[in-house]
Image: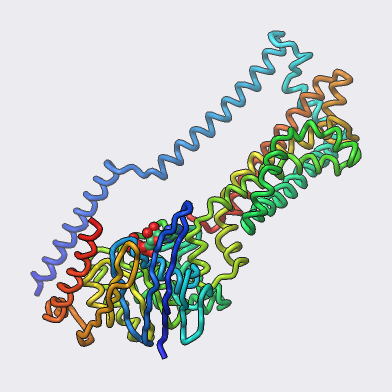
Amino acid sequence: MNSGSNNIAVSKTDRLQENKLLRVKKQSVIEDPAQRERRTRHIALLGRILVGFIIIAAWELFTRIGLLDSYYWSNPSTIVQTGWTSLTEGTLLTDLVYTSGATIIGFILGTFIGSLLGLSFWWSDLYSRISEPYISAFNAIPKLALAPVLVIMFGIGFSSKVILAFMMTVIVTALAAKSGVHSVDKDLEKMLFSLGAKRSQVFSKVVIPSAMPWIVSSLKINIALALAGTIVGEFISSRQGIGRMILYAGQIMDTNLVWVGVVVLSALSILMYLGTVWLERFLLKGRPQ
Amino acid sequence: MYKLEVVAGGKVFKKDGQEVVALQETNMQIAKGKFVSIIGPSGCGKSTLFNMIAGLLKPTSGEILLDGQNIIGKSGRVGYMLQKDLLLPWRTILSNIILGLELKGVSKKEAENRAVPLMEKYGLGGFENHYPGELSGGMKQRAALLRTLLYDQDVILLDEPFGALDAQTRLKMQTWLLQIWGDFNKTVLFVTHDIDEAIYLSDEIYVLSPRPGRLKEIVTVNIPRPRGQDTLLMKEFVDLKKKLLGMLKEDQEKIE
Ligand SMILES: Nc1ncnc2c1ncn2[C@@H]1O[C@H](COP(=O)(O)OP(=O)(O)OP(=O)(O)O)[C@@H](O)[C@H]1O
Ligand SMILES: [Mg+2]
């Protein structure tokens, strides 16, 4: 009995050793892709920050030693100073709220109404065919060229900026949603009908989810278009907004302030882009990948 | 009264001004609780027939009666598993399987309570929260089949449900289907290209002929149940198989 239990003990240690060997082998042959990915990401991030830092430093340096004319190019430290002044003493903050507000409202309205419009084409083939040339025609109009008319129509206030941002986004979204509707698998619709579904149920359970990736893919372009629409609206006529600030700064030849506007707009654009990335994730939640 | 009747049901498609007869006027009388297979070469109108019974396609002529009532153009009266698995790729397997119940207005919780034990039982346990893209072809077919079963109609139409399965899984699924058919007292219409499968499962076999699609013959299978592995070796089985093979071969020669 004694020897029996000894045997077991021996075989156990054997197995342990074997396991260890296996593990060592695994480590040497198989790399953990997740770990490598993480490491690459960290290095890339560091690299990006470094490049950004070099660009800003070079900008500052070149304007100081006179290689770049600081009258046109301003320079980072002056931009920060001017920005700080207009933030604390000027209207930078309210301008920022104005511009981002008009952009976001226009974007949301455009995306929402555009999606509804595009999805509505599923309901009737005839209606879809009749509207088709008009949608294309509206898409072809350079909306920004209409901006002066829109400002006359809707006044120089907030609403004309929202309308412009809306006009810039609505058709792009509608076209994306329409492509989504065309991509719906007819057999999936058939399957749903075979389960006794009403048309409205097919719409909500198959058509909307099928078209969703198409709609979502238009978001990133849309937010940039909406911002462009708002700024053009502000350029044409406005009492507030970053666009107006830039225009005004240009008129009084304050290039530093123009640069502040450009930097603020870039930052706003990046922030809103990140917002759409989040929105994309939210809208495609609970899907594979 | 028959559970399901097709009275002179036929379908003609118009394509580029030309008429294509998918199915000539066909009569079917299927008693409650029967297991009926439909065999025939590709293009003889099997799926067309099913689409008409399921109310997805209106016949050009004839009537379709369920419990004596006309169900032409009325969908949702019978369970129908289409030739493809047609799972919604953005839904998990579980929420795909309960789709029919969801459309009927059954609460999500109750539907899941009914679905999960069935998934366990039929080899999909543990895959509730996987997406269709992560499953093998056979598992997807099983999920589609469960969705049809859970929809819970007296009559079930299955269009080549085991087409994508290997021989072993297929056998398991056949046994399972017979079990369900017995347990739930369903009337089953079953399309297959596999003669062995048709004989093994059915009470009656409808043999269709192509070009134009039409009903060629109805063969009754008089092999006692329960049937098992050794059924495939019985004399009745082999005789029937020869007969059916002969019929299909005639059609084949005609085509060539
Ligand atoms: N929507 C349609 N429009 C025109 N012709 C069609 C249509 N659907 C089917 N057909 C034709 O009807 C005939 C029967 O088709 P069906 O799909 O019913 O065949 P099947 O027996 O199911 O074939 P398989 O075994 O390959 O699935 C074929 O010739 C096909 O081309
Ligand atoms: Mg078919």
For the view shown, which residue lies furthest in the front direction? B18
- How many numbered discs sit on the rendered protein? 0
Q: Taking A274 as reference, is B192 above or below it? A: below
**Ligand 1 placement by image quarter:** bottom left
Give how far across and how far down residue A22 sits, in percent.
23, 50
Give how far across and how far down residue B42 sits, in percent.
31, 61
Please give the name of the residue rendered at 81% of the width and 26% of the height, measured from the top-left corner: A82
A185 displayed left or right of B171 = right
Please, which colouring scheme is shown?
A: rainbow
Give how far across and how far down residue B38 sits, in percent.
31, 73
Q: Taking A68 as reference, is B66 above or below it? A: below
Please give the name of the residue rendered at 9% of the width and 75% of the height, measured from the top-left corner: A1
A43 displayed left or right of B250 = right
Look at the image and tell me whether residue B84 can be seen: no
Give how far across and how far down residue B176 sits, in percent.
30, 77
Q: Nearer the viewer, residue B49 or A272?
A: B49
A185 displayed left or right of A102 = left
For the view shown, which residue lies furthest in the top direction? A66
Q: Quadrant of residue B184?
A: bottom left
Look at the image and tell me whether residue A224 can be seen: yes
Q: Quadrant of residue B189?
A: bottom left
Q: Nearer the viewer, residue B220 or A284?
A: B220
Q: Taking B42 as reference, is A28 above or below it? A: above
For the view shown, which residue lies furthest in the bottom direction? B1
Q: Nearer the viewer, residue A158 or A110?
A: A110
B233 displayed left or right of A121 = left
